[in-house]
Amino acid sequence: EAAGGRGGAEEFWEEEDFNVPTGDGGVLIQPVEDFDDAVEIAGNVMGYPIDDFQRRSLAVILKKESDLLAMAPTGSGKTAVALLAILQAFARGKRAIYTSPIKALSNQKYAEFKEWFRTKGVNGEVSLLTGDIKIRAPPGTKNELMICTSEILRNKLVKSLSGQPGAEAGGMNMEDPDLERLGCVVSDEVHYINDPERGAVWEETIVHLPQSVQLVALSATLRSPQDFVDWIASARGRPGEVVRRTDRHVPLYVGGLSYTPDPADSEFVALFETHGDRAGTFDQSKFKALFPTAEDVARQREETKAANIANNQMRTGRNAELAANAEVRRGGPPPKGGGGG
């Protein structure tokens, strides 16, 4: 640790405002270990003070022997947690991998991280591997973030699995250059592990990931998170922690469209919302109006049927009366039960 108790970071961002040991060009040269230093540096790099959720996540990330499951609603700071983990991997002289479940999301994250590295002065490069697209960082890049689909990382780990002498710790034969000096894997949308068709991809990735690599899993919705982290710890042989937040920055509305003969006139009816005067309250009356029960539908059908029968009877009687009156006007006999002229 640096003199004075302050840590730095090894060639992953360029700043001149920090009173920490730096190399040529103001590049930090030591990994951050002190929590307060890490929070200060993270706030400067991010451009804003990190919030409580991100601080608690950072505290786990600083423990290089621990894994992290960060859970938060959409738009609540999970990407910032991923960035902190990636930068800390760079600080440790390692490379990082960011996985997503679909190619489109990988392409989006590639553009976001490229722009973020450029605007924040991060001394690092971004690679993209999706099967359809392959964009490589320049040869010899030290601080490299590789973004790929979850299947690609799984395939690389399985192919590199070896028990041959000389393999690195964890039984991995690092012939694949993308797995060399790997310090951190960020697994976005990790709840896909519950998918009946694709879940095995995430399971095999976690099981085959070298024990020395820090896993940072991100999810907005995952049932029994502590049980999941306990399973990861058992499978990987290293501890893990859950950091959660429940407040939602992006409003969420649950509801449906009201029925009108013309669909263009339909309106969205909110049954539940996370913000506003009725936040957290489910409107049962509106729900019944939009989605009646089977009993309600049957009763409504019977009422409609009875009303139609009554209307038809009235219409039949009226038509008979009109026909009889017309016959009288033509000189025919009066209707039965009627009086004479």
Image (cartoon, helix red, strand yellow):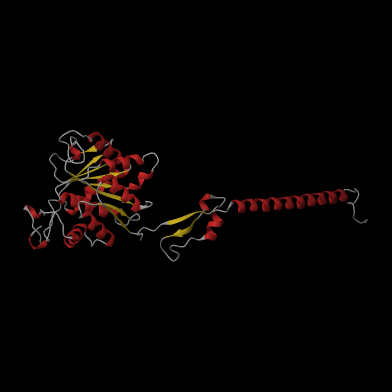
Q: Is residue 118 visible?
A: no
Q: Nearer the viewer, residue 35 or 331?
A: 35
Q: Is residue 165 above or below residue 31?
A: above
Q: Residue, x 46% and y 62% (percent of image)?
A: 281
Q: Is residue 286 left or right of residue 109?
A: right
Which of the image's four quarters has the C terminus?
bottom right
Q: Is residue 119 left or right of residue 154?
A: left
Q: Is residue 142 visible?
A: yes
Q: Residue, x 81% and y 51% (percent of image)?
A: 322
List x then y, in percent, for residue 168: 17, 39
List x then y, in percent, for residue 115: 22, 49
Q: Nearer the viewer, residue 230 or 302?
A: 230
Q: Is residue 249 left or right of residue 255?
A: left
What is the count of numbered marks? 0
Q: Residue, x 70% and y 53% (percent of image)?
A: 307
List x then y, in percent, for residue 65: 21, 51
Q: Quadrant of residue 100?
A: top left
Q: Is residue 219 left or right of residue 137?
A: right
Which of the image's four quarters has the N terminus?
bottom left
Q: Residue, x 30% and y 41% (percent of image)?
A: 150
Considering every residue shown, the one lying at the far right of the view is 340
List x then y, in percent, for residue 277: 44, 66
